[in-house]
Every structure is written in C-alpha cells, then in structure tokens.
Amino acid sequence: MKQVPALKIDGITIHQSLAIIEYLEETRPTPRLLPQDPKKRASVRMISDLIAGGIQPLQNLSVLKQVGEEFQLTWAQNAIISGFNALEQILQSTAGTYCVGDEVTMADLCLVPQVANAERFKVDCTPYPTISSINKRLLVLEAFQVTHPCRQPDTPTELRA
Amino acid sequence: MQAGKPILYSYFRSSCSWRVRIALALKGIDYETVPINLIKDGGQQLAIIEYLEETRPTPRLLPQDPKKRASVRMISDLIAGGIQPLQNLSVLKQVGEEFQLTWAQNAIISGFNALEQILQSTAGTYCVGDEVTMADLCLVPQVANAERFKVDCTPYPTISSINKRLLVLEAFQVTHPCRQPDTPTELRA
C-alpha cells in the first residue's frame, strides 16, 4: 500500500500527515505549530483531527473510486459539508486571525487544503464565513503559496500556476 | 484546575468513545458518563487523549522518544483517520444496506493490511514496544469492529496477538462496550 504522504527523515519513515507534523514539531520546535497551553493545543488537535480524520478520508481518491462515478460528487460534497458545518461552529470559539488564536498552527495547515478540496468539488462556502476568511488570510502567507498544488514538481502543465 | 469530575459524553458501542474510556481508566481519572446515542464521528478523540496525556502525564500513553511517538501517532492516525471513519454509522447509512457489510469489510481489510505491516517493525508486547500507548487504545476497539463486521483476522497475526494481550488488562476490560451504563441488556456481559 503506497501511502502518501510519507516522510523519510532522521533514519525513519513516517506516514500519516498529522503524525509527521507532530514529529517535526517535537524535533524542530521553532517556529511553533502548536501553542504551549494544553487547552489551546487540544483545540488545534481537535480541528486537525476533524479535518484529517473526519472529512478528508471520506472524500479521498480510493473511497471515491468505490462509491462509483455517478455518486462521487454528491458523496464528496456531503462529506465536506457535514464536516464544515461542525468546523464553522468550532471556529466561532477558537478562531482569532487563524483557526486557533492569532498564530498559524497545525489546524491551519489542515484547513487550507481542505478548502481547496471544497472548491474542487464545488461546495458552496457561503455558509462558512469563518472558514473562508481564515483561508483567505492563510493563502497570502509564503509557506502556503510556495507549497500550493499548482507549483509542485509533478504538477501537470495544464494546472500549473 | 476546575473542580468537579470530568464528564465523558460516550456511546457504549462507539470505538472512539472506548478509546477515550481506556485512556481515562489507565490514567486513573474518575469521570462521569453522559450517554449519547449516535456519536457523530471519529477523528477528534485523539485530541482528547493527547490532552489527557499533557495534563495528566502519568502513566504515559506516549513514549518519550520522538521517533517512537511518531510510530504511536502514525498507527493511531491510521486507525482513527484511515479505517474507523470509513466504517462508522453515518457513512454506512449513506452506502446503503446491501453494500454496508462489504464496504465496512473493505475499509477494515485495507487498513489492517497496512497496519499489520507497520507493526512488524514497531511492535513488542504491544503496538509500539512493550508499553501500552495511544496506538493500543485505538487497536482494540478497531479489532472489535472487525469482529462485528466478520472480517477474517487470520492474515493479521500481529494485530490479533497484541489485541489478545491488551484485552486481559483491566483498563480494557472495565471500559468494554458490554459493561457501560448505556449498554442494552441483551449486549451486557
């Protein structure tokens, strides 16, 4: 089972995006991706888990294949809408400039790609003003731009920025 | 710290609830259960376990070494993010009754194939080394789901033997779905 993402680092290979990010945070602690306060860390992880565990797996490639072509769009949309409904509510209490307070955290790293997926599956994001405005603020940051799918080594020509 | 017992909103059968119950039991944290029918979904239970680990650090649920922690999280995420969400109640409802069993089985088999391989390199007595970790809390409920969906676990000897060893531990027994306040009579131990 070829898994993506997988990071080979320090002599080990890690799968699962959040496990990778937490390892990076623990071994290269600055700049922080998780706040110091345990309660804020819980918020960051809760949001990250919701997206990475609750939304994305339900609309990834292999699941969509099993669902069958005619149902794929609705299926993906439902997964995202359901998750975004929950997320928008959570963000009401956690968000500052970004998902949790005013610093970029692991939660923001999960948000942007998921919003990109929402756009790909034509999910109307008007019911999610907090998600949308945070996403907008994140997209102007350099780290989110240089890593965008449209600028990768393997980005097909027609999708290149 | 706030006064008053923690309150756990739990569904007896939810594998996600069970994970957290085990963590609370291992940590010796007394709590109140508020039974909820139809727990929404998976994902966020790991955040709870990590919070418990950071605020009540003993006994440990994550090793000290960052590489071993990465293994624990990788396994936990694989189960909590890669398997469980695909075979939970709300997804199965959408799949439609005739396909539910096959769908759930596929999700579990696919995940267990990957997990069995990973455990080859990480496992000792338990999923990662010889101490109980967050990964083990994820494993046992998922194996219970596999049994519920009649997945043949013969291809997964490491998963099976670790599961067996964990099930004899008290924290895994007292928190079992068959012994919860909201367990229906016919399913009680």
Image (cartoon, coloured by chain):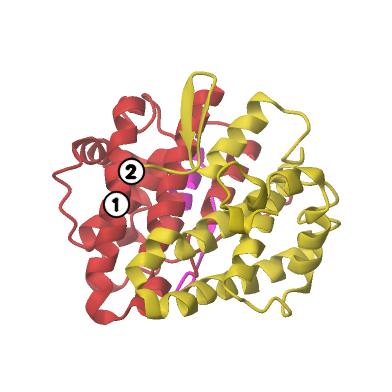
Chain colours: A yellow, B red
Q: Given the image, what chain letter belongs to the residue carrying mark 1?
A: B
Quadrant including the N terminus of chain A: top left
Q: Residue at x 20, y 41 (%)?
A: B156
Decide which of B39, A53 is in the foreground and name it. A53
Residue under label 1: B110
Indicate whether B93 appears above or below B125: below
Can residue A44 be seen from the camera position used here?
A: no
Q: Secondary structure at mark 2?
A: loop
Q: Are marks 2 and 1 in contact (CB under 8 Å)?
A: yes
Q: Is residue B91 left or right of residue A33?
A: left
Q: Position of residue A113 (x, y in %)?
A: 64, 56
* Residue B65 coordinates in the image, percent (x, y): 54, 21
- Residue B12 in the image: above or below residue B72: below
Reading the image, the residue beneath label 2 is A1
Amino acid type of the residue that numbered disc 1 sits on in the rendered structure: Ser
Other-residue count near label 2 (Cα within 10 Å), few / some / many at <14 / 14–19 / ≥20:
few
- Bounds of the magenta segment: B20-39
In the picture, measured across the screen, residue B161 lies left or right of residue A13, that is left
Please state, as top left, top right, bottom left or bottom right, where the C terminus of chain A lies in the image.
bottom right
Magenta stretch containing residue B36, yes or no?
yes
Compared with residue B112, is residue A126 higher up or lower down, i.e. above or below?
A: below
Quadrant of residue B147 in the image?
bottom left
